[in-house]
Image (cartoon, grey):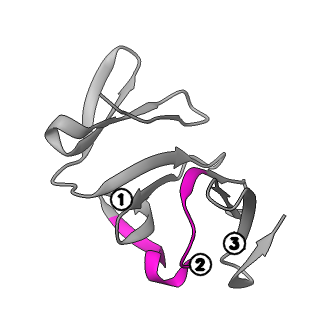
Amino acid sequence: CDCYVAISPTGEIFVTDYDNDRIVSFQHGSGRLVLDNLHGYDMICCSPNGVLYVLTSEALQKLEGSRLQTVKAIADFPEDLEFSAVFVTKEEVIYVLDSRNGRVLRFNPAESFEPVVV
């Protein structure tokens, strides 16, 4: 089964549980439910600030408390983009690996959401 794992700077391990449509985390020998009733999610990543990002079929979102907040709708990404990986920096700059077009795109929410090829 496919799954994604993301590790926060504090060592908390986030794991996608596709069979149960949820994300769980583990730290210090115990687990907890982070999000449930997720449908159509694809991958997760954790920024160096400990912010969990979730890529769904509708948007790139980040976890704020116990809710997902949309950062960028999928419709606002380039049409031919094929997500292979997502990485977020300490400054919350988002890098997306586009395997279909052999490129890396950078999005900076603090400045503009226009993609920059790097």
Q: Quadrant of the N terminus?
A: top left
Q: Nearer the viewer, residue 62 or 105?
A: 105
- Is label 1 in a helix, a strand or a loop? loop
The earlier-in-sequence mark between 1 and 2 is 1
Q: Which region of the structure is painted magenta? A: 68-85
The residue at the point 67 percent across, 62 percent down is 92
113 to 13, vertically: above or below: below
Amino acid under label 2? Pro
Q: Which residue is mark 3?
A: 107
Label annotation for residue 78: 2
- Relative to the observer, which residue lies in front, 33 or 23? 23
Query: Which residue: 72% across, 66% down?
Result: 105
Which residue is at 57% across, 32% downward? Answer: 10
Q: Residue at x 54, y 60 (%)?
A: 82
Identify which amino acid the numbered label 3 is placed on: Phe
Asked if residue 74 is among those painted magenta in the image, a careful observer would answer yes
Q: Position of residue 12 (x, y in %)?
A: 47, 30
Relative to 68, say whether 24 is above or below.
Answer: above
Would you say 15 lies left or right of 44 here?
left
User: In the image, 11: left or right of 97?
Assistant: left
| x and y percentages locating residue 98 in the rendered image | 64, 58
Disc 1: which residue = 65
Q: Secondary structure at mark 2?
A: loop
Quarter of the figure with the C terminus: bottom right
Residue 89, label in figure: none
**Crowding near pointer 3: few (<14 within 10 Å), some, many (20+)?**
many
Whether the residues at callouts 2 and 3 have beta carbons within 8 Å, the answer is no
User: Which callout, 1 or 3, points at the residue further toward the start of the chain?
Assistant: 1
User: What distance separates the C-alpha of mark 1 from that of mark 2?
Assistant: 29 Å
